[in-house]
């Protein structure tokens, strides 16, 4: 790969897993800073908390209050090492499985507890 | 950011209040509403007579006219400030009442 | 050959799609109160929408991403929240109005009050989205929506004076009732240029797997489709101008609009009016709730598609489920459908800048559009539409206060 513009090509890009399924967007990027060494891009972060932080403290507060209404305290954020990136193009392919991602928790929870209780929800394509 | 939000909120509240409630509309507006519904009743009578509209539907139009009549009866008194105004108001209310009655006769209700 | 059937479908979709509760209500109110004089506003709305749809369609065909995708990717999450919230709020109001449109049509047909119909209508819509594919939703509403042609038939039967209509297609300003005139102008534009329309169109291009080969189809669909659809809205305006205006009848309630077609076309016109109101509003209900769900899913990167079973895109499916049921509430509790429609049209007009101005950037980005970026005609059109959107934003609140019925 040649040079990659982090803000332009990576941040907010669509992520897909090994099976080409959508698994969210790059909500934040963490740089690893060690004394005596140049910073390097270490981690892709997926999750509502990371997104909220980018907006501002007031937004983080509103979000916390909103989630408290539903009794949500636990944050479901995925931190994926940058070396899991397979390809950067229209989407960013990661060498992970959707099953292993904490950020997909809501998707799995809804699927199990709500969606699949309603007839007609199962299967692949309509 | 904070100042903007406060100002926007005040403006929104003002806007919603003005849209929601307010002083009764001016006399000419109310007279227009009455004549509009009078004409609606007359057209409905024509169309019902020609079999173009159903009785069910004509009844709904009539109910609309009736509720407009009731509402306007309350507010038109406040807008009519002279004897001439009051006589216009009375005539307009009367026309609508008559038109509603005529539609009732047509639909047999 | 297949391309042309796609064009035909696209055009047909737009015909029925243009006419819905907002355009029916605003066009007939305009015709009843100002005769043909607001026709030029409709024309302006039609042309603007055609350009916007062609652009968001081109974005999707070339970049393989929807407009909502690109709003997040190119402008960042922080900025994205602005169009997200604006579109969500405004589209929700319009959605509630469309459910109101179906409910009022059913009330006029059966005599059962409109508020009783809101929840059943929402449930039926939900069921169709849950079980149906994008193709079914698209084609079904398109074909059934052709019933809206009855407006053209009715207008023709009333023998409008075509020179006078032509005159109305040229911009004019009245000497009296100015506030009311411009208020109706703003609401007509809000009814014609709705963000959910070009957002949905963009997502639909991805659902239908459009590629660069479809750019011609895109142009014809966006152009002809909206032209034909817009003609029906003009027909509604003409019919109201000829049936209601001469008698001094103003549209204060939805029920009065049916007379506009009952007059020239008798019982058939009345029945087809109810069918048109019912079907076009129902079609729009499905479109709007999908547009909202698409925007959420695409903005947050969830799996999404009307062609996937809900189990495969749970967050997307739950989004449209919750939204359609909540949107039934205003009508179910008896809110005045016409007042709701009027407010939502003006709100839509005011919200346009946040979804029009970003296009100025995206449509000229060679990374996204390769060598299909805007030519100067499209850019000029876009700048004009962007300026128009800003004017609408500034004028909306004052006009709502001064001219809102």
Image (cartoon, grey):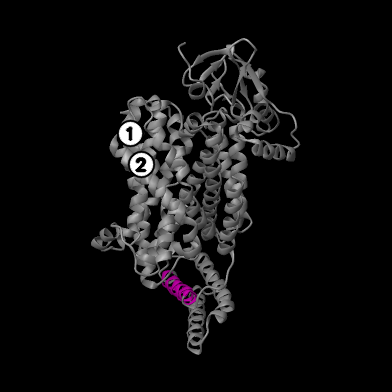
Residue C323 locus on image (x, y percent):
60, 43
Residue B28 locus on image (x, y percent):
46, 77
Residue C310 locus on image (x, y percent):
59, 31
Q: Earlier in the sequence, mark 2 or mark 1?
A: 1
Q: Nearer the viewer, residue C303 or C124?
A: C303
Residue A116 locus on image (x, y percent):
66, 30
The residue wearing badge 2 is: C382
- Please report contact status of discs 2 and 1: CB closer than 8 Å, yes or no: yes
Q: Main secondary structure of the magenta part?
A: helix
Residue at position x 41%, y 33% in the image? C362
Residue at position x 57%, y 77% in the image? B75
Residue at position x 25%, y 60% in the image? C162
Question: Which type of secondary structure does the marked residue at label 1 adopt?
Answer: loop
Figure quadrant of the N terminus of chain C: top left
- Residue range corresponding to the magenta coloring: B29-47
Residue C160 belongs to the span the image colors magenta: no
């Amino acid at each position: 790969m040649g040079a990659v513009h982090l803000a332009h090509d990576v941040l907010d890009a669509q992520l897909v897993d090994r099976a080409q399924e959508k698994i969210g967007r790059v909500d934040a990027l963490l740089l690893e800073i060690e004394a005596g060494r140049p910073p390097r891009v270490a981690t892709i972060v997926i999750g509502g908390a990371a997104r909220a932080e980018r907006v501002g403290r007031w937004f983080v507060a509103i979000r916390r209050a909103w989630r408290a209404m539903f009794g949500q305290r636990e944050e479901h954020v995925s931190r994926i090492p940058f070396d899991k990136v397979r390809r950067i193009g229209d989407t960013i392919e990661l060498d992970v499985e959707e099953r292993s991602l904490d950020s997909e928790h809501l998707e799995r929870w809804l699927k199990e507890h709500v969606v699949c209780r309603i007839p007609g929800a199962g299967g692949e394509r309509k | 950011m904070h100042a903007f939000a406060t100002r926007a909120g005040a403006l929104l509240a003002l806007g919603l209040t003005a849209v929601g409630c307010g002083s009764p509309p001016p006399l000419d507006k109310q007279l227009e509403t009455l004549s509009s519904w009078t004409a609606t009743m007359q057209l409905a009578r024509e169309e019902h007579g020609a079999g173009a509209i159903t009785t069910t539907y004509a009844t709904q139009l009539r109910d609309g006219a009736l509720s407009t009549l009731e509402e306007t009866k309350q507010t038109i008194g406040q807008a009519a400030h002279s004897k001439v105004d009051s006589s216009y108001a009375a005539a307009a209310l009367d026309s609508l009442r008559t038109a509603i009655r005529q539609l009732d006769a047509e639909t047999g209700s | 050959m297949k391309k042309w059937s796609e064009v035909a479908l696209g055009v047909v979709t737009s015909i029925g799609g243009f006419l819905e509760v907002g355009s029916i209500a605003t066009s007939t109110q305009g015709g009843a109160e100002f005769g043909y004089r607001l026709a030029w506003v409709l024309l302006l709305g039609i042309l603007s929408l055609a350009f916007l749809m062609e652009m968001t369609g081109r974005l999707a065909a070339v970049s393989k991403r929807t407009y909502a995708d690109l709003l997040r990717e190119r402008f960042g999450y922080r900025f994205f929240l602005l169009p997200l919230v604006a579109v969500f709020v405004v589209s929700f109001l319009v959605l509630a109005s469309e459910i109101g449109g179906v409910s009022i049509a059913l009330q006029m047909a059966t005599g059962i009050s409109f508020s009783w119909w809101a929840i059943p209508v929402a449930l039926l819509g939900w069921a169709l989205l849950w079980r149906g594919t994008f193709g079914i939703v698209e084609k079904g509403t398109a074909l059934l929506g052709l019933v809206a042609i009855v407006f053209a038939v009715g207008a023709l039967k009333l023998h409008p004076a075509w020179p006078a209509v032509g005159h109305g297609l040229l911009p004019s300003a009245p000497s009296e009732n100015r506030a009311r005139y411009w208020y109706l102008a703003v609401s007509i534009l809000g009814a014609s240029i709705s963000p959910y329309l070009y957002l949905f169109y963009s997502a639909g291009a991805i659902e239908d797997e459009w590629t660069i080969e479809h750019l011609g189809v895109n142009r014809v669909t966006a152009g002809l489709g909206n032209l034909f659809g817009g003609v029906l809205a003009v027909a509604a305006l003409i019919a109201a101008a000829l049936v209601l205006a001469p008698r001094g009848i103003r549209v204060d309630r939805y029920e009065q609009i049916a007379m506009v077609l009952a007059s020239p076309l008798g019982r058939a016109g009345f029945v087809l009016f109810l069918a048109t109101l019912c079907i076009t509003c129902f079609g729009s209900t499905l479109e709007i709730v999908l547009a909202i769900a698409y925007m959420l899913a695409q903005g947050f990167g969830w799996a999404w598609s009307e062609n996937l079973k809900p189990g495969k895109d749970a967050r997307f499916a739950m989004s449209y489920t919750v939204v359609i049921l909540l949107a039934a509430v205003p009508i179910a509790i008896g809110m005045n459908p016409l007042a709701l429609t009027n407010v939502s049209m003006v709100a839509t007009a005011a919200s346009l800048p946040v979804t029009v101005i970003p296009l100025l950037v995206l449509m000229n980005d060679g990374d996204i559009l390769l060598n299909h970026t805007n030519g100067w005609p499209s850019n000029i059109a876009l700048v004009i539409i962007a300026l128009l959107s800003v004017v609408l934003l500034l004028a909306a609140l004052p006009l709502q206060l001064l001219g809102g019925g």
